[in-house]
Image: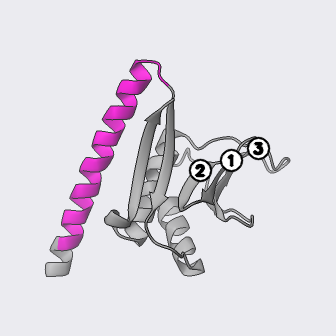
Amino acid sequence: MIQKIKKIDLFINLFYQLLIIQIIINYLTYLKMPVFHTIEVLFSKITQKQYDDVINYYNLKKPTNFLPLQLLDRAEGGFEIVVDTRSIYLSKQLRWHNKKLQPYPGYLSFDNDEILLLYLSLCDVFTESDVILHIVRV
């Protein structure tokens, strides 16, 4: 029962964080200011099972108009969303760099909603205190 209450509290807390983040993004969009996202983590390693859990959570919760999230097959690791299978450059990529998931130059970037869902997916697999979403006006 206590675990159920903790999960409900975590869900409510994440929901309010997501709501606040969405309000900030909407305000910045209204001001016509570009927004740059970075997801930072405080843990040192991510296992294959944890990658799989993040991807499964994302793909389970994504709206039907979103493309599926996949593991990025690069040395740095990370995540990708393949937009067009005919070209590797038509994929959205976030690669690990200094414990941060960042867009890779020359590739498409994740949309705001995709970033937020990935952040929530990471929070579900790890703890909320181990995952930080940075929103920066460019």
- Residue 102 got which mark? 2
Tell me which label, 3 or 1, sits earlier in the chain: 3
Residue at coordinates 48% horizontally, 53% vertically from top-left?
39
Numbered range of the magenta stretch = 6-33
**Percent of width and height locating residue 85:** 80, 51
Mark 3 or mark 1, which is nearer to you? 1
Measured along the vertical axis of the image, is residue 136 above or below residue 72? Answer: above
Q: Are marks 3 and 1 in contact (CB under 8 Å)?
A: no
Residue type, label 3: Leu
SS of the residue under disc 2? strand
Report which residue position mark 3 lands on.
Answer: 90
Residue at coordinates 60% horizontally, 79% vertically from top-left?
48
Q: Is residue 19 left or right of residue 29?
A: left
Residue at coordinates 66% horizontally, 65% vertically from top-left?
77
Q: CA distance from mark 3 to mark 1?
A: 12 Å
**Depth order, front residue of 11/76:** 76
Instruction: Characterize the local packing of mark 3: few (<14), some (14-19) or many (20 or more) Cα atoms within 10 angstroms.
Output: some
**Percent of width and height locating residue 59:** 53, 60
Residue at coordinates 44% horizontally, 48% vertically from top-left?
116
Instruction: Characterize the local packing of mark 1: few (<14), some (14-19) or many (20 or more) Cα atoms within 10 angstroms.
Output: some
Mark 3 or mark 2, which is nearer to you? 2
Q: Are marks 1 and 2 in contact (CB under 8 Å)?
A: yes
Regarding residue 72, the answer to whether it shows in the image is yes
Q: CA distance from mark 1 to mark 2?
A: 6 Å
Measured along the vertical axis of the image, is residue 7 above or below residue 93? Answer: below
> Mostly what secondary structure, the magenta segment?
helix
- Residue 104 got which mark? 1
**Depth order, front residue of 70/43:** 43
Residue type, label 2: Gln
SS of the residue under disc 3? loop
Q: Quadrant of residue 42?
A: bottom left
